[in-house]
Amino acid sequence: MQTVLVTGAAGYIGSHTIVELLNNGIAVIAIDNLLNSKKEAIKRVEQLSGRAVPFYCVDLCDKKALDSVFLKHKNIDAVIHFAGVKAVCESLVDPIKYYKNNVVATICLLESMQTAGVKNLVYSSTASVYKLDKPALDENSPLGSASPYGITKAMAEKAIIDFSAADPDFKAISLRYFNAAGAHKSGQLGEDPTGYPHNLMPFLTQVAVGTRPLLEIFGDDYDTLDGSCVRDYMHITDLANAHILALNALKTTTGTKIYNLGSNKPVSVLEIVESFERVNKVKINKKIAPRRLGDEPSYYTVSTKAQFELGFKTTKTLDDICRDHYAWQANNPKGY
């Protein structure tokens, strides 16, 4: 049986990916420092999968604690690295937090993997590494993020690329996500941001269940079809399954490979709100607010590289995303 160490395991993407790993017969060792997540997510994963998940509350920058996990579990075949911080706006006001949690932590992880002899890595990257000087992006688009968040993710990715170049036996796949949303079909596992949500969908669902008074739409005067920002959204389950495809691809790859992950179907903020109201038969209290610092008018992937090389293709629609995300929030109005 393949065994995978998952960092950032209690987070939104990490927890959903663990469910899919377990459902595919892959054993999981979970690590999370619980900075932006809750251990309850791991308990829900165990309930949904019927499988136990060894969990360690470890910060990746704590090398001694991290090394001890690898020493205890000497059968680890690969690592999926989700751990990090991810809010563009926050990174502009607290960049040091981002350099520590996204760059230093990744280097510590690579050192521990090297010591333990673990040679396979799937890295959770982001579309924010791109320069975003045009809306349509593929893997050859120029890098050059305007935010410390995007810069630190690109720096961590470059460290992985250089690490694999120095060690011919080390293989990595970096997955550059666009926007993930939705929740597990059970309604028991979903996105539970700590404090103020920085993403649209959790804010939207919190307004829908009454835990927040209204949704602010940041700008309606962008050069887009309806004036609101345009993004590429994919269902969290589709994204989770992409990591299993990446693990399989590591068996035959060399060096570091990079893939964009998205739906190739850009939608605007106003289109998402309309879909959410229609599918869930709710009315969202909303208002137009000034543009938000760090927001780009439009960006989405036009790449099919992941489809051709990994076999990745989204199966869920925007309506599915809206329905599942709302079901999670309705079942868990205060999160975990």
Image (tube, helix red, strand yellow):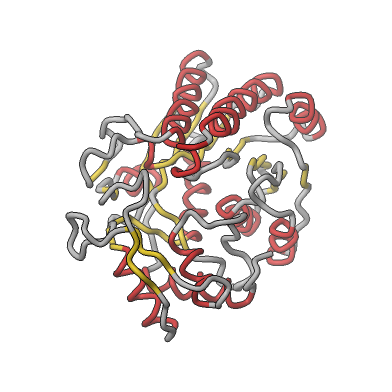
- Residue at image position (42%, 30%) is 151
Depth check, front residue: 219 or 39: 219
Quarter of the figure with residue 294: top left
Depth check, front residue: 294 or 281: 294
- Residue at image position (21%, 61%) is 227
User: Is 191 situated left or right of 76 in this image?
Assistant: left
User: Is 200 situated left or right of 300 in this image?
Assistant: right
User: Is 38 situated left or right of 110 in this image?
Assistant: right
Quarter of the figure with residue 75: top right
Is residue 31 at least partly visible in the picture?
no
User: Is 314 situated left or right of 26 in this image?
Assistant: left
Residue 118 in percent (x, y) is at 64, 27
Question: In which quadrant will I find the N terminus?
Answer: top right
- Residue at image position (45%, 31%) is 253
Residue 65 in percent (x, y) is at 79, 30
Residue 100 in percent (x, y) is at 59, 28
Q: Is residue 162 above or below residue 190?
A: above
